Image (cartoon, rainbow, N blue to C red):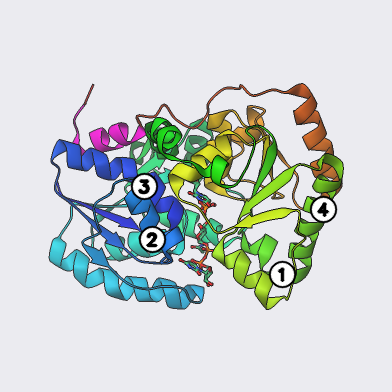
């Protein structure tokens, strides 16, 4: 069994890391293709370093671009590699353009596709990620669903039940494997002069939130209202997409926002762990906040990850400032920080590799 592993963006590197490590530990032949959809040091190589991952054998150097251009370039560059390497299965993780390209390139060559984090649906077709998820699921041979919600969605869409494996999310493996290392190595709270439990952490990069000037202004108004009500520090490691939109729209940020470049995984775990509250539109951070016992406000109208809301760890507030302030008030007065974990037992990569190789590691 030879496994081709495709990554391209920050969350894919983080969530694929446990699978890469598992292949390495078991001596399973594998190779990594990196599309380089993310390429800035703080979105890319820092994660290979933090997670101690081997360098990818192939780098497609695709970079940024319009959806068709980016996805098309990946397909063109991936095909000859897959023909040459002849993997038995190609693994993709998540819902980015890299995922769709990897799955499509393999599927067209008759190579089996394994989709990690299958079955997520926001039912919002304006999201580019929703198209990528649906298309990838329907050309995959192994659908690694996170939990019962995703299993039910896939069955409802007519996917062969034999292809669906409910395993959890590899986000739990990465987080549990790096919590201790992060605590030992990261000095981010000191560096940023933050007091544990006394700041809000914000991230935002969804096209719907940041690509339209009026929506981005709404989001900033929400932060303004949070600041007026709670005064404490608001830390915002800013995604390059958002940074470039702020520049394009000529938006100046208020000085109470502690704006910092994106940080590495070990630092970001500490920033999350000691935040009073997290405000985010990120998929991975919705999951990690829930796993870490930190309440979050999801800056979206919908989510393909309803579990965090279902277990009482998060609330959908969109860009509605009044809703956010009200939800924050409830969270902070309740002081609740424990709930059921819907995102995996930290051994998800083992389950995935067991299924692919037909073995049982336990
Ligand atoms: C992509 C994914 C999104 C995922 C996110 C994780 C798609 C359609 N989107 O969004 O699902 O949640 O990654 O962060 O696949 N840029 C840099 N340096 C980089 C990468 C990007 O400066 O290393 C800037 C460029 O201006 C680029 C913009 O960010 O145009 C957007 O990058 P892109 O990869 O297209 O989308 P993301 O918003 O990162
Ligand atoms: N992350 C990080 N540094 C940051 C912001 C996020 O290491 O400055 C990590 C975070 O821990 C999570 C992942 O990046 O694992 C989420 O990535 P992102 O929000 O870019 O993408 P999404 O999950 O929304 O696809």
How far apart are labels 4 and 1 at the CA level? Answer: 19 Å
> Looking at the image, is mark 3 or mark 1 nearer the viewer?
3
Crowd rating for badge 3 (residues with CA inside 10 Å; few <14, some 14–19, many 20+): some
* Mark 2 Cβ and ligand 1 under 8 Å apart: yes
**Circle 2 residue:** 8
Crowd rating for badge 2 (residues with CA inside 10 Å; few <14, some 14–19, many 20+): many
Crowd rating for badge 1 (residues with CA inside 10 Å; few <14, some 14–19, many 20+): few
Label whose residue precedes the other's in the sequence (4 or 3): 3
User: Where the C terminus falls, by quadrant?
Assistant: top left
Disc 2 to disc 1: CB gap under 8 Å: no
Residue at 68 percent across and 34 percent down: it is: 276
* Mark 3 Cβ and ligand 2 under 8 Å apart: yes
Element under disc 1:
loop
As for residue 351 lying within the magenta part, the answer is yes
Disc 4 to disc 1: CB gap under 8 Å: no
Q: Which mark is residue 212?
A: 1
Q: Position of residue 73 (x, y in %)?
A: 36, 76
Range of magenta residues: 348-360
């Amino acid at each position: 069994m030879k496994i081709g592993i495709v990554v391209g963006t920050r969350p894919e590197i983080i969530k694929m890391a446990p699978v890469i490590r598992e292949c390495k530990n078991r001596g399973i032949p594998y190779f990594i293709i990196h599309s380089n959809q993310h390429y800035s040091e703080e979105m890319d190589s820092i994660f290979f370093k933090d997670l101690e991952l081997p360098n990818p054998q192939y780098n497609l150097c695709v970079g940024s671009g319009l959806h068709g251009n980016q996805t098309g370039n990946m397909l063109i560059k991936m095909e000859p590699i897959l023909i040459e390497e002849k993997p038995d299965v190609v693994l993709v993780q998540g819902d980015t353009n890299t995922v769709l390209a990897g799955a499509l390139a393999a599927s067209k060559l008759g190579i089996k596709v394994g989709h990690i984090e299958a079955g997520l649906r926001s039912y919002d077709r304006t999201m580019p990620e929703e198209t990528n998820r649906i298309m990838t699921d329907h050309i995959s041979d192994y659908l690694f669903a996170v939990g019962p919600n995703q299993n039910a969605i896939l069955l409802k869409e007519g996917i062969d039940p034999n292809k669906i494996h409910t395993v959890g999310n590899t986000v739990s493996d990465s987080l549990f494997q790096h919590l201790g290392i992060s605590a030992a190595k990261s000095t981010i709270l000191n560096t940023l002069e933050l007091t544990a439990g006394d700041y809000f952490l914000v991230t935002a990069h969804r096209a719907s939130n940041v690509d339209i000037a009026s929506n981005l202004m709404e989001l900033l108004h929400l932060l303004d209202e949070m600041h007026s009500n709670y005064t404490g520090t608001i830390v915002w490691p800013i995604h390059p997409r958002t940074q470039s939109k702020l520049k394009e729209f000529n938006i100046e940020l208020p000085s109470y926002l502690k704006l910092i470049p994106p940080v590495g995984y070990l630092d970001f775990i500490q920033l999350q762990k000691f935040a009073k509250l997290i405000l985010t539109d990120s998929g991975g951070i919705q999951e990690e906040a829930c796993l870490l016992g930190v309440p979050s406000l999801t800056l979206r109208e919908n989510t393909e990850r309803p579990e965090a809301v279902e277990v009482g760890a998060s609330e959908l507030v969109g860009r509605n400032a009044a809703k956010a302030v009200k939800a924050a008030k409830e969270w902070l007065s309740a002081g609740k920080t424990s709930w059921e974990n819907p995102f995996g037992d930290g051994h998800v990569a083992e389950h995935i590799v067991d299924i692919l190789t037909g073995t049982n590691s336990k």
